[in-house]
Every structure is written in structure tokens, then in C-alpha cells.
């Protein structure tokens, strides 16, 4: 399966050794700081000799004890579930890691509930009041990006109207 751009940014931007030292080391006395050799005690089985190894060029963990293999996203998801009871989706794991490591994510799914923001309402109301007069909706980032850049007013109204139908069905109005 093709990796998303955000996924690739995380895989490149979060070294597993850093991840291990941030999450695994503070979780128990038996975990020592992982040096650049990338060998450590595995958090996924009752490990006493360091069995976990980072395959440097691939930035992938492999454990010779329990057989676990995973990149930083998979490892993070498994660790969070086992140690914190947090069941993260892949997207949530990507967001967590991005915020900790200061990695900028791109908005890949602009018509998602999470991309709603209120500021856009004013923009729309000023721009084409007749279209949205009766609608109590929130704007999506798309208003300030793609549609906002279309100069032909009729084309814009058409785009707003098309989007309007999608928003209403999404919100359930
Ligand atoms: Zn293991």
C-alpha cells in the first residue's frame, strides 16, 4: 500500500532511537538509554538481554526475542496500547508523533470533520452572502484555499453550492 506524505514525514523525521528514549526508557527501570548502536531491551516481551535492534537504514525495530518488527508508527501504536491503554489509529499516531517532534503535517483530507474551523464563516458571509444566508455551517479550509482563489464569481458560486450539499450531508442537516 502506498504511504501517505504525512506517514513518510514521520518515518523520516522520528528516529526510532529517539522514540525509544522518550517513551520506553521512562516506563521502567530495566530500560536503559538506547545509544546510537540501536540495541535495547524490548518493551513487548519479558526481555532481560537486549533483544531489540534498530535496522538503521530502514529505521525499523526488530526483536530477536518475540519477533516484533515495526516502524516508528506501528511501534508507537503498540506501545501506547500496551502501556497506556490508548488505542490509536494510524492517523492519530502520526499526529501525536508529529506534534512531539515538531513535524508539519499536510491537510490531506480537507473535507474531514477535523478540518472545520469557525473563522471561515465570516469570510463566506462577506464573500457571497446569498448562498449561505440560511445556513448555519462552519467553513472548511477549502474556502480559504482552492475556491477562494477562483476569480470567476459564477464558477465560485457553483463550487460553493456543490460544497454546500456535501457539507449538509456530512453534518446531517
Ligand atoms: Zn520482544
Image (cartoon, rainbow, N blue to C red):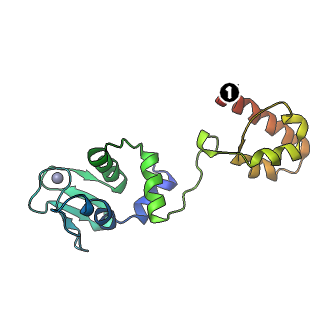
Percent of width and height locating residue 108: 58, 49
Q: Quadrant of the C terminus?
A: top right
Label 1 CA crowd tier, 10 Å (few <14, some 14–19, many 20+): few
Question: Which quarter of the figure has residue 138?
Answer: top right
Residue bearing mark 1: 169
Question: Which quarter of the figure has residue 89?
Answer: top left
Q: Quadrant of the N terminus?
A: top left
Is residue 124 visible to us here? yes
Q: Is residue 35 left or right of residue 16?
A: left
Residue that lies at the very extreme toward the top in this rendered image: 173
Q: Residue at x 83, y 50 (%)?
A: 150
Percent of width and height locating residue 11: 40, 59
Percent of width and height locating residue 156: 84, 43
Q: Is residue 134 left or right of residue 88?
A: right
Percent of width and height locating residue 2: 45, 48
| Placement of 68 over or under 98, stated as above or below | above
Query: Considering depth in this image, is 151 or 85 the residue closer to the camera?
Result: 85
Q: Secondary structure at mark 1?
A: helix
Residue that lies at the very extreme toward the bottom in this rendered image: 36
Q: Residue at x 88, y 42 (%)?
A: 128
Q: Is residue 138 left or right of residue 153?
A: left
Q: Residue at x 81, y 53 (%)?
A: 149
Total tally of numbered discs in the picture = 1
Query: Considering depth in this image, is 123 or 71 the residue closer to the camera?
Result: 123
Label 1 within 8 A of ligand 1 by Cβ: no
Is residue 1 visible to us here? no
Question: Which quarter of the figure has residue 82?
Answer: top left
Amino acid at each position: 500500500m502506498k504511504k501517505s506524505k504525512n506517514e513518510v514525514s514521520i518515518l523520516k523525521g522520528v528516529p526510532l532511537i529517539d522514540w525509544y528514549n522518550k517513551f520506553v526508557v521512562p516506563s521502567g527501570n530495566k530500560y536503559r538509554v538506547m545509544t546510537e548502536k540501536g540495541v535495547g531491551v524490548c518493551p513487548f516481551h519479558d526481555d532481560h538481554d537486549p533483544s531489540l535492534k534498530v535496522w538503521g537504514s530502514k529505521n525499523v525495530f526488530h526483536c530477536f526475542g518475540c519477533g516484533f518488527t515495526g516502524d516508528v508508527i506501528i511501534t508507537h501504536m503498540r506501545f501506547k496500547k500496551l502501556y497506556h491503554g490508548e488505542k490509536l489509529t494510524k492517523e492519530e499516531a502520526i499526529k501525536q508523533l508529529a506534534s512531539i517532534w515538531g513535524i508539519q503535517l499536510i491537510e490531506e483530507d480537507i473535507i474531514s470533520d477535523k478540518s472545520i474551523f469557525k473563522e471561515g464563516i465570516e469570510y463566506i458571509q462577506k464573500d457571497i452572502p446569498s448562498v449561505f444566508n440560511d445556513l448555519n455551517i462552519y467553513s472548511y479550509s477549502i474556502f480559504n484555499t482552492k475556491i477562494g482563489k477562483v476569480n470567476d464569481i459564477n464558477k465560485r458560486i457553483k463550487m460553493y453550492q456543490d460544497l454546500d450539499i456535501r457539507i449538509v450531508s456530512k453534518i446531517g442537516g
